[in-house]
Amino acid sequence: MLRPQPMPFAHSETPESIRTALGAVIRRRREDAERSLSALAQTADMSTAYLSEVERGLKDISTEKLVAIARALDLAVAELYLELAQRLGSREALQQRRSWPDDPRMQLRIAAASLRPNALRSVADFSLYLASTQATPPKRRIGFTVDR
């Protein structure tokens, strides 16, 4: 008797789980941008109730509406898809996150993009506090000294 082979995709690749994961990605990005549900819905030209259902994974979303949401959040649609793939456990997408560029400015840009705006503000405020409360260190000679 032939046994059926297991399907090559993960159990997480059901329409319901994909809708739920995409809704969670949209909600997280909206919250990171500090936008209300109604403000994003208005900017993306859709109803607040529809956007709420999309975020909760209850409704499918068309490509046109997804593009409108991405534009309203000032994001590339590819970023939403990449995060969706990471949430669904794609090995390639997870590798994408692990690759770290050599350029320090690009590293900073990537690291800052993953932080919530409030966290960035807290770091900036604390850095300003430290800079204003600490005296400048005394100048030291740099180089070799010879004891005679």
Image (cartoon, rainbow, N blue to C red):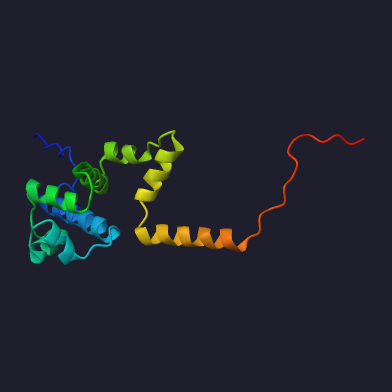
Q: Is residue 91 above or below residue 83?
A: above
| Numbered-mark total | 0
Going by the image, does 58 lie left or right of 119?
A: left
Q: x%, y% of residue 48?
A: 11, 65
Q: Nearer the viewer, residue 13 or 107?
A: 107
Going by the image, does 90 lie left or right of 146?
A: left
Which residue corresponds to the image point at 40% horizontal and 47% vertical from the top-left?
Answer: 111
Q: x%, y% of residue 119?
A: 40, 60
Which residue corresponds to the image point at 12% horizontal and 61% vertical from the top-left?
Answer: 42
Which residue corresponds to the image point at 40% horizontal and 37% vertical from the top-left?
Answer: 100
Going by the image, does 69 lie left or right of 144?
A: left
Quadrant of the rendered image containing residue 52: bottom left
Quadrant in which the C terminus appears = top right
Q: Is residue 142 above or below residue 14?
A: above
Q: x%, y% of residue 40?
A: 17, 60
Q: Nearer the viewer, residue 76 or 95?
A: 76
Q: Nearer the viewer, residue 131 or 81?
A: 131
Q: Is residue 106 above or below residue 114?
A: above
Which residue corresponds to the image point at 41% horizontal and 60% vertical from the top-left?
Answer: 121
Residue 57 in view (yes/no): no
Q: Is residue 23 above or below residue 77?
A: below
Residue 78 in view (yes/no): yes
Q: x%, y% of residue 24?
A: 22, 57
Farthest right residue?
148
Quadrant in which the N terminus appears = top left
